[in-house]
Image: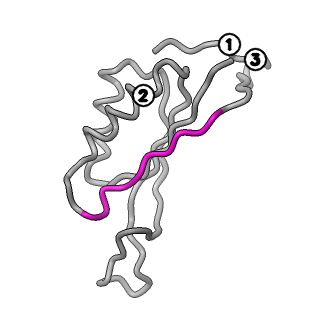
């Protein structure tokens, strides 16, 4: 099994653009969560300095990981502070709960 987990934290207003790019690429599944935090960019107008954003997570075959990362970065890039980050991590195993079977390979 050769899966990667791609986690991207991006601006809320660019989520639709990122989703469209992933659909165009044929990514078989995406999870999106609303988040709040700070990093390189801090919201100086907010009492707690937190910035609102979204986390996009994709589990994908290792062979497709680079193209997925490039699509996310292309769609989410503005050139301004606070554009976000993309992280790639290795995944040991993925199971489908419905079938209780080990997932061998996803299309990309």
Residue pictured at 45% horizontal, 15% vertical: 108
Question: Which one is nearer the viewer's eye here, 66 or 36?
Answer: 66
Residue 78 forms part of the magenta stretch: no
Residue pictured at 35% horizontal, 28% vertical: 22
Residue receiving disc 1: 104
Q: CA distance from mark 1 to mark 2?
A: 19 Å
Residue span colored magenta: 81-90
Q: Secondary structure at mark 2?
A: helix
Please tell me whether residue 53 is drawn above or below residue 77 in the rendered image. below
Question: Which one is nearer the viewer's eye here, 67 or 28?
Answer: 67
Instruction: Using a 10 Å C-alpha cutoff, classify the residue at mark 1 as few (fewer than 14 neighbours), some (14 to 19) or many (20 or more).
Output: few
Residue 101: percent from left, percent from top: 77, 15
Residue receiving disc 2: 66
Residue receiving disc 3: 102
Q: The N terminus lies in which quarter of the figure?
A: top right
Q: CA distance from mark 2 to mark 3?
A: 24 Å
Please tell me whether residue 79 is drawn above or below residue 5 in the rendered image. below
Left or right, 84 with reference to 91? left
Residue 97: percent from left, percent from top: 74, 25
Number of numbered discs present?
3
State yes or no: discs 3 and 1 in contact (Cβ < 8 Å): yes
Q: Secondary structure at mark 1?
A: loop
Instruction: Using a 10 Å C-alpha cutoff, classify the residue at mark 2 as few (fewer than 14 neighbours), some (14 to 19) or many (20 or more).
Output: few
Left or right, 103 with reference to 57? right
Q: CA distance from mark 3 to mark 1?
A: 6 Å
Please tell me whether residue 84 is drawn above or below residue 7 in the rendered image. below
Residue pictured at 27% horizontal, 48% vertical: 14
Residue 44: percent from left, percent from top: 31, 83
Residue pictured at 33% horizontal, 33% vertical: 70
């Amino acid at each position: 099994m050769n899966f990667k987990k791609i986690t991207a934290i991006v601006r809320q207003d660019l989520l639709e653009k990122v989703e469209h790019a992933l659909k165009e690429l044929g990514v078989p599944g995406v999870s999106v969560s609303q988040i709040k935090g700070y990093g390189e960019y801090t919201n100086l107008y907010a009492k707690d300095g937190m910035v609102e954003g979204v986390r996009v997570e994709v589990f994908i075959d290792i062979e497709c990981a680079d193209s997925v990362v490039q699509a996310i970065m292309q769609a989410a890039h503005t050139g301004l502070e606070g554009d976000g980050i993309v992280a790639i991590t290795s995944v040991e195993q993925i199971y489908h709960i419905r079938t209780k079977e080990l997932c061998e390979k996803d299309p990309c």
